[in-house]
Image (cartoon, grey):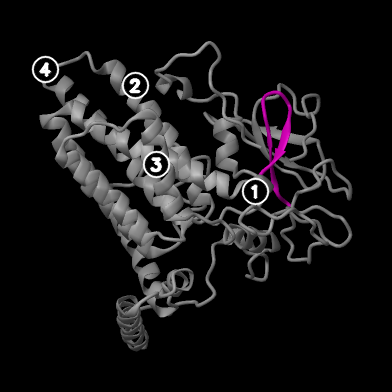
Amino acid sequence: MRSFNAQSSLGQGRSSVAVLRSSRRCKLSARTRFPLVCQAQAQQTKSPIKEAGTKNGKAAGNRTGSKGKNNGSAYEGGQDEEGNLGACDVFVAPDGKVTQAMCCDYGFRSGVGRLYQGSTGEVPKNFFALGGDNFAREFKQLRRSFRFNEYKSISEVNPPRNFVERLWGSAQQKGVEALATLDERLEKTPLLEELDPHEMPDEVTDSNGNMTQDCSEVRAALKGLKLRNEDVIAYEHQRKAQEGEVVAPFPIRWTYNFLCFSLDILYKNRPIQRFWVLEVVARMPYFAYISMLHLYESLGWWRAGAELRRVHFAEEWNELHHLQIMESLGGDQMWWDRFLAQHSAIFYFWVLILFYTFAPRMAYVFSELVEHHAADTYKVFTDTNEDLLKSLPPPVCALEYYRGGDLYMFDAFMTTKKEMPRRPACK
């Protein structure tokens, strides 16, 4: 990361996101609750931000980034052959420091339904309109999933190792081909609209409809990220030997073990997708606990949970940003991953409601187990991919949350108080 001080040129130094083509002079436009957004007015060929990428489809210059521990290629946002910078976002922190953001956000929800994007803070449509819009969008993606066989990417990173896996892979392939053939036939009738095989979100395409140079580089770098289940299990055993194991009754322990086993099997060698699913599920405890505390207060049974609700909302707000970071890295791209994560989350929510109804403290034990597993997994992941991760600029949503100056309720869930508040680095 390279940065420069823009305090003098950006007024009061409130956090902002800028599309910096090369000028430091940005015209600020006020927004309601979230940071300002500024856009450069002029173009030059030189800028202190050397890593900003191209979005005009021109070839990038020679890249000499260091290799990560996983042997993946390091990412460096590009310049074209003449040294001109593309239209990459940069983040202006309250202290005037400017940080380059990742040039490509290619999550499935990019541009709609995401915090810090266009419709933030608007009143939603009614239940039926939202449900209908989502069904139409997801049904189209379901068709695309087997018409263009997005499941192939899963088998490519997990080749069959024995007869049973080869048999399962063959049956899966036959099923996908049968559904694709049926869809092609129905497409020739008025029942289904024609699918575009090259359809991609506007956020990741250039004027010709092709994926931008920067997005291609980000995707290539992300494919180099590694995570081995064996390493996570070994680290968990090491932590338990040092700190001791969380005591949990059999129903809690069994549910937790089943969750971990499912993640290990379904998301082997797919770390970003695994983390996205984990973050979708990780928000459910706080939704469930807040719902039950609201119920107790509405019935007039117990009002002392107001402070607890505040802590849980702060925790959920934090998990939301973890989720958005994984979405911006493409964790929610596949229809199957979204289907599995969202349906599992609903089931998990009601399981937690049941736990909280009969044994609230046990519900918190379950959350503790899941959080330990998530922390262990992230620790192994960051250690394994340290160099490659450091070469990637952070997504805009991460900069908005961790560098925005208003860490909204971030300190509220830091129940173990320290002299200095915790401030994670984001660079």
Kind of residue at badge 1 = Met
- Which residue corresponds to mark 2? 310
Measure the C-alpha gap from mark 1 to mark 2.
32 Å
Q: Nearer the viewer, residue 253 or 128?
A: 253
> For residue 301, which numbered disc appears in the image?
4
Give the residue drawn at x 77%, y 25%: 7
Residue 146 location, x and y as percent?
38, 76
Give the residue drawn at x 53%, y 17%: 421
Looking at the image, tell me whether mark 1 or mark 3 is earlier in sequence order: 1
Helix, strand or loop for disc 2:
helix
> For residue 236, which numbered disc appears in the image?
3
Kind of residue at badge 4 = Trp
Label 3, residues with CA under 10 Å away: few <14, some 14-19, many ≥20 = some
Looking at the image, tell me whether mark 4 or mark 2 is earlier in sequence order: 4
Label 1, residues with CA under 10 Å away: few <14, some 14-19, many ≥20 = many
- Which residue corresponds to mark 1? 102
Measure the C-alpha gap from mark 2 to mark 3.
31 Å
